[in-house]
Amino acid sequence: MWWRKASPRTGARTRQTVRLAGIVALGAMVAGCFQPLYGDRGPTGDPTVKAELSQVDIAQIPAPNGTPLSRIAVETRNSLVFGFNGGAAAPAPTHRLNIRMSSQELAVTIDLATARPDVSNYGLNVYYDLVDLRTGKVVLRDQTFSRVSYDIPGQQQRFARSRGLRDAENRAAKVIADNIQTRLASYFVAGT
């Protein structure tokens, strides 16, 4: 009979269907607002993050010559240059990125029989400034860090220890470059 109330089960299904339809409609409206962070074109014709990053000049990172830190500084800068430009020629710079870094090594696990480290951590601490070249003012000042661990396989394998340390240094430099690139992309999108 048509005058009877719907069962509680039918009412629950109806509410669930209405909610699902609302979610689908909201998703369709928001889908048009999506823009990839590193896309080639902005929806309003504004410069994209990719274009903004390609106009950042990365200054040489100061480090004492002939030290492991100088190699890591070059590795970090090369990762940033490739991340910003993709290996292409850079247009006229609008910003300059100045980076200062320091490193540290810490033994995490010690072999009780030999009192030598089995596992170590390698860390990089980085401070950086983004300078607007038109005004000469620092528009962003921040810091980041990276900690990576590496094993020392046996005390008689000195080459394996040095190779493990170099691999840890390279991984730390890559993490630093990724952190800086992400932070600068955030700055160019949000302005903060």
Image (cartoon, rainbow, N blue to C red):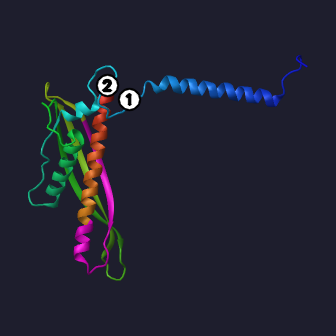
Q: How many marks?
A: 2
Residue farthest along the bottom direction in this orientation: 113
Image quarter of residue 129: top left
Q: Is residue 150 magenta?
A: yes
Question: Does 60 sit above or below residue 160?
Answer: above
Residue 127, image x, y percentages: 23, 44
Residue 52, image x, y percentages: 23, 31
Identify the residue under disc 1: 35
**Marks 1,2: beta carbons within 8 A:** yes
Secondary structure beneath dot 2 equals loop
Q: Is 37 in front, or is 126?
A: 37
Residue 25, image x, y percentages: 57, 23
Callout 2 amino acid: Gly
Identify the residue under disc 2: 42
Callout 1 amino acid: Gln
Q: Is residue 106 magenta?
A: no
Image quarter of residue 8: top right
Q: Earlier in the sequence, mark 1 or mark 2?
A: 1
Asked if residue 192 shows in the view, the reply is no
The alpha-carbon separation of the residues under discs 1 and 2 comes to: 8 Å
Image quadrant holding the C terminus, namely top left
Q: Residues within 10 Å of mark 2 (few under 14, many from 20)?
A: some
Q: Is 112 in front, or is 36?
A: 36
Residue 63 image label: none
Secondary structure beneath dot 1 equals loop
Q: Residue at x 44, y 24 (%)?
A: 32
Question: Does 22 sit above or below residue 102?
Answer: above
